[in-house]
Image: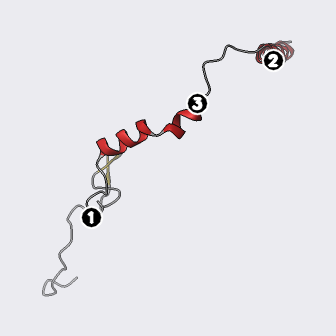
C-alpha cells in the first residue's frame, strides 16, 4: 500500500484472534439489548416450576435386571480381555 493512501480504522489486534491458544477478543459480540430477565429471576422461575420436578425419578435401588446386565457386561469384557491375552 502506498504511503499516501489512507488506511481505514481497524483494530490493531484483528489479525491475531488467537494468541498462545487463548482467544484474545470476544468470540461472539455482546447482544446490543439488555437481557429480558436477570439471572436471579430465571433461577427463581426454574426452582418454582412444578413440571421440572416431575421428570426426575425417585432414588430407586438397583433392580435385579440391572444387576444381571452389569454382570453380563463384566463377563463379556473379561472374556475379551482373557481371549486377547492368550
Is residue 60 or residue 16 the one in the foreground? 60
The tag earlier along the polypeptide, 1 or 2, is: 1
Indicate the position of residue 72 as horizontal and vertical percent values: 83, 16
33 to 63, vertically: above or below: below
Q: Residue at x 41, y 36 (%)?
A: 47
Cα–Cα span, label 3 and label 1: 35 Å
- Identified at 30% across, 62% down, the residue is 31
Residue 24 at x, y percent in the picture = 27, 52
Q: Identify the secondary structure beneath mark 2.
A: helix
Q: Is residue 82 above or below residue 56?
A: above
User: Which quarter shows the N terminus?
Assistant: bottom left
Nearer the viewer's eye, disc 3 or disc 2? 3
Q: Which mark is residue 56?
A: 3
Badge count: 3
Q: Is residue 65 left or right of residue 55?
A: right
Residue 33 is marked as: 1
Looking at the rendering, which quadrant does residue 20 occupy? top left
Question: Which residue is more in the foreground, 20 or 45?
Answer: 45
Q: Using residue 45 as the reference point, say whether residue 8 is left or right of it.
A: left
Question: x, y (%) of residue 9?
Answer: 17, 75
Residue hosting label 2: 65
Q: Earlier in the sequence, mark 3 or mark 1?
A: 1
Amino acid at each position: 500500500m502506498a504511503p499516501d493512501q489512507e488506511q481505514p480504522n481497524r483494530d490493531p489486534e484483528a489479525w491475531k484472534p488467537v494468541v498462545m491458544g487463548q482467544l484474545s477478543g470476544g468470540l461472539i459480540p455482546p447482544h446490543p439489548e439488555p437481557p429480558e430477565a436477570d439471572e436471579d429471576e430465571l433461577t427463581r422461575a426454574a426452582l418454582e416450576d412444578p413440571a421440572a420436578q416431575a421428570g426426575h425419578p425417585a432414588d430407586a435401588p438397583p433392580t435385579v435386571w440391572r444387576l444381571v446386565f452389569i454382570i453380563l457386561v463384566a463377563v463379556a469384557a473379561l472374556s475379551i480381555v482373557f481371549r486377547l491375552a492368550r
